[in-house]
Image: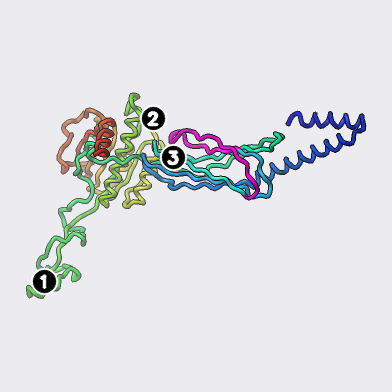
Amino acid sequence: MKFFFPLIGVVFLIAFIFNLSELYYLVYLSLGLFLIIKYSNKKAKENLRLERNLSQDRIFIGEEIEVNLKLINTGFWPIFWLSYNDVVPVKLRLPLNSRVTILFPKESVEFSYNLSGVKRGIYDVGPFRVTYGDPFGFEEERLSFASERKLIVYPKIIPFRNLGLPSRIAFGEIIWPQRIYQDPNMFRGLREYQRGDSLRDIYWPASANNGELVVKEYESTVTIENMIFLNLAEQDYGISGLDAKIETAIETAASIANYLTQKNQTVGLASNGRDELRSTTAIKAGQGKEHLMKIMEFLARVDTTREDDFIELVQDYSKHLATGSTIIIITREDTKELIKLLLKLCRKGLNAIIIVIAKDVKHNEFLNRQYTENLVIYRLKDQSSIYSLEDKTANS
């Protein structure tokens, strides 16, 4: 391109000096061709369209999605050569090779590739980059289609038996000693009618047979809140194997939240971790799969922090929990300050479970106590043991 105009100038000068009309025609033809190509490249930029489809935009670690792309030339001008490529998250797969083609008017080109959920996180799929030009090498243009789709990779869900946690832990729905809240889905039996009983509870067939009023009696239950507190302070986990320990802590939080949701229980989550997309540190307790996905998305994007404010976090958010609720602490170490705070909260009517991601605990007197105790410590298995158990389960 940089030699085109000087060459045209030389040819024009020769034609002028020697009065060669044929060279004039060559100059005019070359300039006309250049202007046509210039206009064609300009229209190509306006007429190129990209369609991107993801088979799913939310997956768990180990799952896979297909990305389909369609590049369309919507104009009436051809694109003589075109090189295109999609920028993919390096944590999910190897870089893609560029493809080269010619794109005629109203024609399209399609290609697809797979992304695997290797590491949790929120990823941009794209941008899509295009380089195009003319067959004579006059111009080369670049175009980028910004990424408009995100892929969320949720943390891995691990069964309780692989984590080393008992199958029965004291959180969730409990039997309430006083008959305050009666669950109509939990029928316990029949008894004689007493003054103050609701007429809706009278069981008329049995009353007719017995000759006296009989009412249905239900189990008295109350659904308590479960609040997971996830400690992601780097200094608490140490430098050695930091990433593996943090991922184990996050996967443990995700697994407990999933377990409680399956049991139709109420669960929330608070963490001192750094949330890059939002400034939130907690998700209020709720129920259902939709609420679970909010927790999973938070856990997908949360990262470590250097702030030393975990005790303060637990103290602040536990103030809003109702009596009988359960605090589930996921941390590296059962410190004296943490035990002191939890004992204080237990005296106020809360229950506390500490899940320690370490080989040893400092307060053995609370280790593996009966689930009916209001403060219990469980020691989590190390990550290598977790995944070796998973492999055995998958192969069996």
Q: Mark 3 is on which residue type?
A: Leu
Left or right? Give the position of 239 relative to 201. Answer: right
Residue 178: quadrant of the picture: bottom left
Where is residue 140 drawn, in percent x and y?
67, 35
Q: Which residues fall within the magenta stretch?
A: 83-106
Residue that sits furthest to the front in the current view: 22
Give me the C-alpha separation between circle 3 and circle 1: 63 Å
Please state which of residues 129 and 274 is positioned toward the viewer in this rendering: 129
- Kindly indicate whether the residue at mark 2 contacts the one at mark 3 (C-beta within 8 angstroms): no
Q: Mark 2 is on which residue type?
A: Arg
- Which of the two labelled residues, at mark 3 and mark 2, occupies the earlier sequence position? 3
Residue 327: quadrant of the picture: top left
Q: Which secondary structure, mark 3? A: strand
Where is residue 256 drawn, in percent x and y?
28, 43
Give me the C-alpha separation between circle 1 and circle 2: 66 Å
Give me the disc on residue 230: none
Which residue is painted at 54% across and 45% down in the image? Answer: 110
Q: Is residue 203 above or below residue 188?
A: below
Q: Which secondary structure, mark 1? A: helix
- Which of the two labelled residues, at mark 1 and mark 2, occupies the earlier sequence position? 1
Left or right? Give the position of 51 relative to 199. Answer: right
Q: Residues within 10 Å of mark 1 (few under 14, many from 20)?
A: some
Q: Which residue is mark 3?
A: 115
Q: Mark 1 is on which residue type?
A: Ala
Give me the C-alpha separation between circle 3 and circle 2: 32 Å
Q: Residues within 10 Å of mark 2 (few under 14, many from 20)?
A: few
- Kindly indicate whether the residue at mark 2 contacts the one at mark 1 (C-beta within 8 angstroms): no
Give me the disc on residue 206: 1
Q: Which residue is mark 2?
A: 306
Where is residue 326 drawn, in percent x and y?
24, 44
